[in-house]
Amino acid sequence: MKLISVVVPCYNEQEVLPMFYEEITKISAQMKEEHSELEFEYLFINDGSKDKTLEIFRELADKDKRVRYISFSRNFGKESGMYAGLKNAKGDFVVVMDADLQHPPAFLPQMYNYVKDGEYDCATTRRVNRKGESKVRSWFAMKFYKIMNKISQTEIVDGAQDFRFMTRQMVDSILEMSEYNRFSKGIFSWVGYKVKYMPYENVERPAGTSSWSFWGLFKYSLEGIMAFSTAPLAIALILGIISGAASLVLYILAIVSACAGWIYTSLFVIIATVLLIGAFQLVCTGVLGMYLGKTYMESKRRPIYIASETDEIWRSRRSGSGT
Ligand code: UDP
Ligand code: MG
């Protein structure tokens, strides 16, 4: 018997959830027909949704015993949702996928084929285009991957996604990384293992809206850079050397200009220098501050998520009340 856990982080997904459930159960049945050893569990995470997502989970849990869920006490972000899912999944294999069908369940049979015999430890999709995305967003994404791969030892494949079919061994390795500032794209890559990238064309959401704003994505990319690279810390050093050299040149210039009697020129030069050095110092302090902030958050050792309800609590409450 082989158990596959399907982990699905959900934030305000009432519109697509029924569609998703229908799709995933259809694919599961198909896979079971082909491989009789397979069993499934669906582990939904409610990331503090404000709509009827939790109610839908309860309904699904009532009618299908394969459905499990964890409901957070508030919105903790998709990273926390994925972590909670991986931590609580019981499967020999774990799939992480979005609820919005942008990660098509139709990929699962093929993913299982790659992973089942140990040929690969992980099968994942890789977007070959960014259809349905704004030009500006694509441009920033492209730049992000370029910079990230230059300054970090952890390679992050452009277009790689959080749609992952993994072995238990890989999941356990990921869980060993219990850091608070989580950047999954980096974590998935950092743990290594043999990964199969399956190219696919981007699909748009059938319903609901994406919860990522441009600013949100920008902050997330900074998070990624800071979680997997300390290169920005070197900016301080480089700027220090440059400004030191520049001020040396300006001192010489000031002496020369004083000798030649260009009083005003040297004044301008001095003001410019002061401003420049001030700017450099602010940049350096800023960079240091950002890392210090992250270290501060890590040192608190806060839980990555807090669950306020699970399918077990719900089921026992229901059976307790005699319904
Ligand atoms: N999600 C989540 N918590 C959040 C934001 C999103 O669990 O705070 C889930 C969301 O329900 C979906 C997945 O993460 O299943 C991807 O989100 P979305 O479709 O909004 O992102 P996009 O596909 O636009 O990158
Ligand atoms: Mg989506």
Image (cartoon, rainbow, N blue to C red):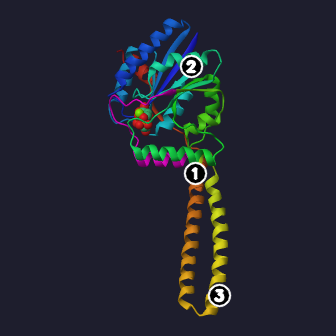
Q: Residues within 10 Å of mark 1 (few under 14, many from 20)?
A: some
Quarter that holds the C terminus: top left
Q: Is residue 137 magenta?
A: no
Quarter that holds the N terminus: top right
Tag 1 secondary structure: helix
Quadrant of res 252: bottom right
Tag 2 secondary structure: loop
What is the three-letter code of the residue carrying label 3? Val
Using the image as rendered, state which of residue 107 and residue 207 is in the foreground: 107
Residue that label 2 marks? 91
Q: Is residue 217 magenta?
A: yes
Q: Residues within 10 Å of mark 3 (few under 14, many from 20)?
A: few
Quadrant of res 155: top right
- Please name which of the two marks, 3 or 2, marks the residue nearer to the observer: 3
What is the three-letter code of the residue carrying label 2? Gly
Q: Are marks 3 and 2 in contact (CB under 8 Å)?
A: no
The disc placed on residue 294 is 1
**Gap in angstroms between the C-alphas marked 1 and 2:** 33 Å
**Gap in angstroms between the C-alphas marked 3 and 2:** 76 Å
Q: Are marks 1 and 3 in contact (CB under 8 Å)?
A: no
Q: Residues within 10 Å of mark 2 (few under 14, many from 20)?
A: many
Magenta stretch in the rendered image: 199-225
Decide if ligand 1 comes within 8 Å of the CB at mark 1. Answer: no
The reply to whether residue 129 is in sight is yes
Q: Earlier in the sequence, mark 3 or mark 2?
A: 2
Using the image as rendered, state which of residue 272 and residue 322 is in the foreground: 272
The reply to whether residue 300 is in sight is no
Q: Position of residue 286 (x, y in %)?
A: 55, 61
What is the three-letter code of the residue carrying label 1? Lys
Decide: is 79 above or below 114.
Answer: below
Identity of the residue drawn at 36% across and 34% down: 12
Using the image as rendered, state which of residue 241 and residue 69 is in the foreground: 241
